[in-house]
Amino acid sequence: MDKAQQDAMKKEAGIAAAQLVKDGMVAGLGTGSTVKFLVDELGRRVKEEGLEFTGVTTSRRTQEQAEGYGIKIVDIDDVDRIDLTIDGADEVDANFNGIKGGGAALLWEKIVAVNSDKIVWIVDSSKVVDVIGKFPLPVEVIPFGWSHVFKRFEERGYKPVLRLEADGEPVRTDERNYVIDLHLERIDNPQELAEDLINTVGVVEHGLFLNMVNEVIVGDPEGPRVLV
Ligand code: 5RP
């Protein structure tokens, strides 16, 4: 699949998911190139159909895009609950275990997710896999003492790589933390790994989203299909 085909499938999934947002909802808006298509479509619906909803975003990038369309965005602490969150993912398996954080927004994404009544992921078909882990697993770490966390990951055989910007500086998340990507190739026991990571001092959050999602909309050459 080339990039143009992949983008077409992302767009298809984003447009389909935008139909799930209804008047009066508080909707969580994820991050990434697939979500960008979702927000474009929501912007269109706001302008052309008069859709009125309130958004909570999982990154400053998404906030800027949504506000550019006149979508009302509020702070997560200003709402009691999020009705529905629509987000992208880097990989998802048949049990809805997934990897997120390719766009370094995993911490806010997980906070928004756990405060949502319903979670829908939008992906192109290349992201539906038998076993997760081919995509490097992002782990958000505090900058203070990060190299010690990194060494610990090396000792455990996690094959860590500190994520860098083009200028060689560490990527910073919206919370100014670093991201270490674990090149595991396959994750056979995601629950065990998740516990190990979250119990490592210095780790803020990891990109394993286990059994949290209710529905996955997959962009496919034959049209979007919904996994439930
Ligand atoms: C950002 C994410 C994204 O949702 C994930 O990386 C998918 O991105 P894209 O839609 O660009 O493929 O988790 O932290």
Image: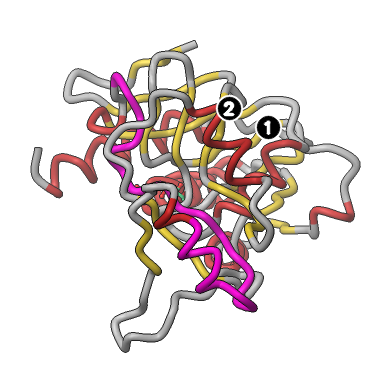
Task: Read off the magenta span.
Answer: 130-152
Res 221 label: none
134 in the magenta segment: yes
**In the rendered view, does 58 fall on the left or right side of 161?**
right
Label 1: how many Cα within 10 Å (few below 14, some 14–19, many 20+): many
**Height in image: 58 above or below 7?**
below
Q: Secondary structure at mark 2?
A: loop
Q: Find out whether the residues at labels 2 and 1 contact each other: C-beta distance under 8 Å.
A: yes
Residue nearer the viewer, 95 or 40:
95
Q: Amino acid at mark 1?
A: Leu
**In the rendered view, does 24 fall on the left or right side of 139?**
right
Q: Is mark 2 within 8 Å of ligand 1?
A: no
Q: Which residue is mark 1?
A: 84
**Height in image: 175 above or below 76?**
below
**x, y percentage for residue 72?**
72, 57
Question: Residue at 58% of width from left, 22% of height from top?
Answer: 211
Task: Classify residue 8 by image quadrant.
Answer: top left
**In the rendered view, does 162 fall on the left or right side of 202?**
left
Q: Which residue is mark 2?
A: 20
